[in-house]
Structure formats: C-alpha cells, structure tokens
Amino acid sequence: MKTEKQIIICNCCKKVIQEPTGIPHGEFLHVEKEWGYFSGKDGEKQEFDVCEACYDAWIKSFQIPVKTIEVTELV
C-alpha cells in the first residue's frame, strides 16, 4: 500500500520537522495517547510531534529527570 508523505510540524514551536518529500530536518518525538476510563479525556485519542529543541526544554521542567541509557550500537 502506497502512503503519501506528509509534512510534520512541531506542535510547540511550529518548526517544520519533515517536508512532504520525506526529507527530515532533524529528530523529533511523536506521541500517541488513547485516554481511558477515569480520565477527563475518556474516549479521546491525541497525538503530537515535538522537535528535539522543544523536547530538551520540556524535559528540563520535569521534577524527576529522564533516565538516559547510552546506546553503543546504532542501526
């Protein structure tokens, strides 16, 4: 099945992360969440993309630091 490439834009800063041609402008985090019972968003699915710069700024606000594990074999 052929899928069309789409533009990916950071939800925080509106920076273009990937062009429709599929050419990336850097790494990013894609998040998808389906909310369940006992949440104020029951039955909703949300998704967003965050560029690396916004991700770095975001995790600095965390009360508990993100666990970092060094990967020695890159594929």
Image (cartoon, rainbow, N blue to C red):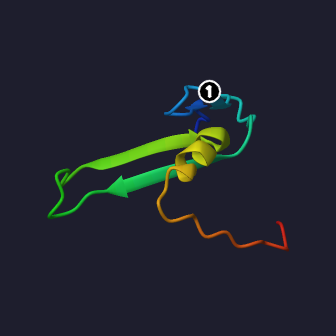
Q: Is residue 40 visible?
A: yes
Neighbor class of circle 1 (other Cα within 10 Å; few <14, some 14-19, many 20+) is: some
Residue at x 85% of width, y 73% of height: 73
Q: Determine whether the residue tagged by mark 1 lies in a helix, strand or loop.
A: loop
On the question of residue 2 being in view, the answer is no
Q: Closer to the camera, 4 or 37?
A: 37
- Tell me: 17 left or right of 38: right
For the C terminus, which image quadrant? bottom right
* Amino acid on which disc 1 is placed: Lys
Is 29 or 70 nearer to us in this picture?
70
Residue at 66 percent across and 40 percent down: it is 53
Residue occupying image coordinates x 26% and y 57%: 35
Residue 29 pos. (x, y %): 58, 49
Could you tell me residue 18's position as x and y percent?
67, 33
Tell me the residue that label 1 is attached to: 15
The residue at the point 66 percent across, 44 percent down is: 52
Q: Is 19 located above or below residue 53 in the figure? A: above
- Is residue 44 found left or right of 57 in the rendered image? left
Asked where in the image residue 15 lies, by quadrant, the reply is top right
